[in-house]
Amino acid sequence: MPRFTVAIAGGGLCGLVLALALEKYAPDVDYQIYEAAAELTTAGAGIGFQPRTLSVLRELGLEQAVLKIAGNGEKDLLNIVYRKSDQKEGYTFNDSETDEKQWTFHRGELQKLFLGHIRHPERIHLGKRLVSYTQSKGPNGRVTLRFHDGSTAACDVMLGADGVKSQVRAAMYTQLADAAKQAGRIEEAKSLRSHINAVFSGFSAYRGLLKREPISDGKTKPLNMSAILIHIVAYPISQGRILNVAAITTDRESEGTLYEGPWTTEVSQEEVRREYVGWEPEVEEIVQNMGNWNKWAINVVQDLPTFADGRVAVLGDAAHSMTPFQGAGAGQGFEDALMLGMLLGQSLVTTASIPAALKIYDKYRRPVAQKVAALSLENGRMHSLVYPQLDAQISAGHVSMTEPEYLARIVENMERLKEWRRGTDVLQDCRSALQLLQDTISGESMVIVKL
């Protein structure tokens, strides 16, 4: 007889890592994954991990398996080359091997690896697109899920890992807004309703995968390193066999608006080429050798006031979808999953105390994830050579500098934006959350997971 039941909405990377965390820390809990798609595909583009992310996978026993499919193999340091390339003769303004470890992957290969480590694949239900849910009140309350096909399911706790277009988040914030309106808190209701949908970040990315052989490197650094070509990002995945390319464009005027039209579309090589006319030859060569391009309008979740409501919580992109400029979006979702697995794995957590456990998850994970999202947005502007604070000082005549000096300041600030990775520890965050759980739910004994 399971201690309680968990429904996971979404069978992507974050949902699978959550399942793996539950299998490790909460083997006496029954979980079921409900995935909207009719099949779990292994398609996708590139993804990057830093040490914090790898520490999650190490804790789940997946580190060695993951490193075997890294784009840079088990080499953990990448050269990062910054070039100003929006001219016929570009030049490098920073070229150094970072002291920060990082690894690159093909998203589809990670999905396949995680699926292969799930001990209970029979618990994954496909073609289950969530429409809504309801919560019953009381210490033994339940959550009822309703799906597009007319079926229903019940659980003690529901966790939404269903992506940036999360139906769990939409239902949660619709219910929170309705409750606020009924209580006469009209402005609060309006604010809560604004969190139902993701908004446009102002950035779009032309993305593609390129086999490395066609690209020459006669005048540039070898393409087995990360090269940010203001603003093209290219790095190896699939054990170095494929180059992941993302060509970024910016529309600051549309930032924060609801994006009209499809978020991902196939585009012609000619459309991409027009964006980079006049750039240095190496950039034009990358564009010309790409077979297929997709345009991705990068939408994000604005800072939510809570990740949890009662017996329901959101995680990953459903909670904090962010721009990709810290290489940390997926990793933050994995951290959410690890903490949820640890909290729900504690023997003191019963059906009655699930809401308390989810509040602790929200207390620890929301500030971290939202800080990383803010840093990522700022870093994206730096990569596009936009430094608002410095630009304002220059415009006001308070600062005067040459172009190389300006670019050096941008690199210096980008390094500052990565400092959070070096001085923080997700496992320490988990220890603190577990201690708070023990302090909060008093009167019973509990064995804390040793990290």
Image: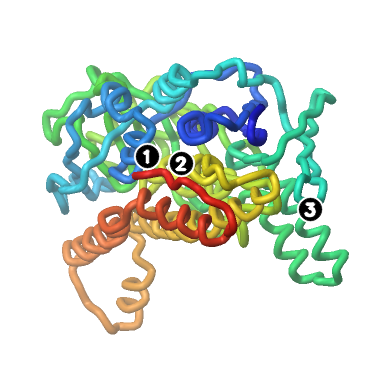
Location of residue 46 with respect to 242 vertically, above or below? below
**Which quadrant of the figure has residue 150?**
top right
Q: Cβ–Cβ below 8 Å for labels 2 and 1?
A: yes
Of the numbered discs 3 and 1, the one sitting upstream in the chain is: 1
- From the image, tell me which residue sits under label 3: 175
Horizontal and vertical percent for residue 291?
40, 20
Q: Which quadrant holds the N terminus?
A: top right
Of the numbered discs 2 and 1, the one sitting upstream in the chain is: 1
Horizontal and vertical percent for residue 96?
12, 48
Q: Which quadrant holds the C terminus?
A: top left
- From the image, tell me which residue sits under label 2: 338
Which mark is on residue 105?
Answer: none
Horizontal and vertical percent for residue 193?
74, 58
Of the numbered discs 2 and 3, the one sitting upstream in the chain is: 3
At 55% from the left and 19% from the top, the residue drawn is 120
- From the image, tell me which residue sits under label 1: 56
Q: Secondary structure at mark 3?
A: helix
Q: Would residue 200 be found to the left or right of residue 109 on screen?
A: right
Q: Secondary structure at mark 1?
A: helix
Q: Count of labels shown?
A: 3
Q: Secondary structure at mark 2?
A: helix
Q: Cβ–Cβ below 8 Å for labels 3 and 1?
A: no
At 76% from the left and 57% from the top, the residue drawn is 176
Amino acid type, residue under disc 1 in the picture: Val
Q: CA distance from mark 2 to mark 1?
A: 7 Å
